[in-house]
Each structure stands twice: as C-alpha cells, then as structure tokens.
Amino acid sequence: MKLNKKTILIIACTGFLFAFNIQKSFGCSCIKPPPSKQLFKKAVAVFTGRVIELKSPFRFFKNYNDRTKVTINVDTIWKGTKKETITLSTPKHRESCGVSFVKGNNYLIYAFGTESNLTVNQCGRVLQIGEATKDLAELGEGTVVKK
C-alpha cells in the first residue's frame, strides 16, 4: 500500500492530537448565586483570611481537571473548622470555573465539599474583603482565630 503526502500529513496530525490529549474548553457558566444567607446554610465553611500559598500542577498543555491548592491564614470564622490555616482547592483554570486567587490578598470565602476537602469555584461566593462589606454586615460577628 502506497501512501501519498496528504494522507501521511493527516495521519501525523491525528496522532499528534491523540498523543497530547487536547481537550475542548467551553468556558464557565453559572446561574446567579443565591443570597448570602442561603449560601451560608449550604456552605461547609465560611471564613475570612489571607492567601499565603498557591500550588498548581504544571503541564505543557492545559488539563481542565487540574486543581489549584490554596492555603489561607484564617482571620475570622462564621461556620466550619476552627483552624488557623485552611487549605482548599479550586479548578486551576478560569474556563473550568476556577477562582483566580492572589497571594497576599484577603478574601471572604464560602467553601463547599467536606471539612477535609474544601472547594470553591466561580459559581459560589469568594469576595475580596473590599467587596464583601454587605456580606460581612449580614454575617455579623464571627469567631476571631487566635494566633
């Protein structure tokens, strides 16, 4: 069987796509989150804190299943564990509804999942402290974490 250049090129390109497992991306799409009181009831943990570490796997090609581990130095807790630091995860990529945390910034976080495996995404509620005035007023006084 003799193969022409066009056939060889098509086979090579197809092999390349399969070899590197290129995935489609459809972007993040969320319904409007419920009011903070409803989110509070559903959340496993609600707290404020400063991001002290971000860990993400590196890959040459995007893998939309990758997650970023976010370690937070907790200031105040309204619900959930009373730890000084909490590690949670979020999808690594915004297209997978990942939250783009910034090391050193302070956030109000409504986390879901389980106490041992907390997660957040864009469809929940993660607010920088400067944007969380209304939520903080509704939450009232929380428990300050002693350090």
Image: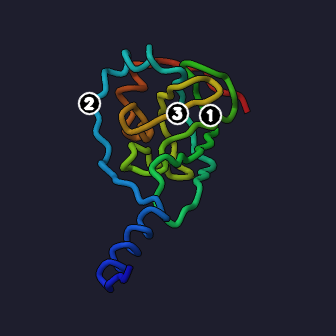
Rendering coords of residue 13 (x, y %): 38, 73
What's under tag 2, amino acid-wise?
A: Ile
Classify residue 57 as left or right of residue 35: right
Please tell me which residue is depicted at 59% across the width and 55% down the height of the picture: 57
Please tell me which residue is depicted at 40% across the width and 20% down the height of the picture: 39
How many C-alpha atoms fall within 10 Å of the one at disc 3: few (<14), some, or many (≥20)? many
* Cα–Cα gap, marks 1 and 2: 28 Å
Classify residue 48 as left or right of residue 38: right
- Reply above or below: 52 against 118: below
- Look at the numbered disc 3 and give the secondary structure of its residue: strand
Query: Which residue reaches farthest bottom?
Result: 5
Q: Which residue is under mark 1? A: 74
Please tell me which residue is depicted at 28% across the width and 39% down the height of the picture: 29
Rendering coords of residue 147 (x, y %): 73, 33
- Look at the numbered disc 1 and give the secondary structure of its residue: strand
What's under tag 3, amino acid-wise?
A: Thr
Q: Which residue is under mark 2? A: 31
Q: Which residue is under mark 3? A: 119
* Cα–Cα gap, marks 1 and 3: 16 Å
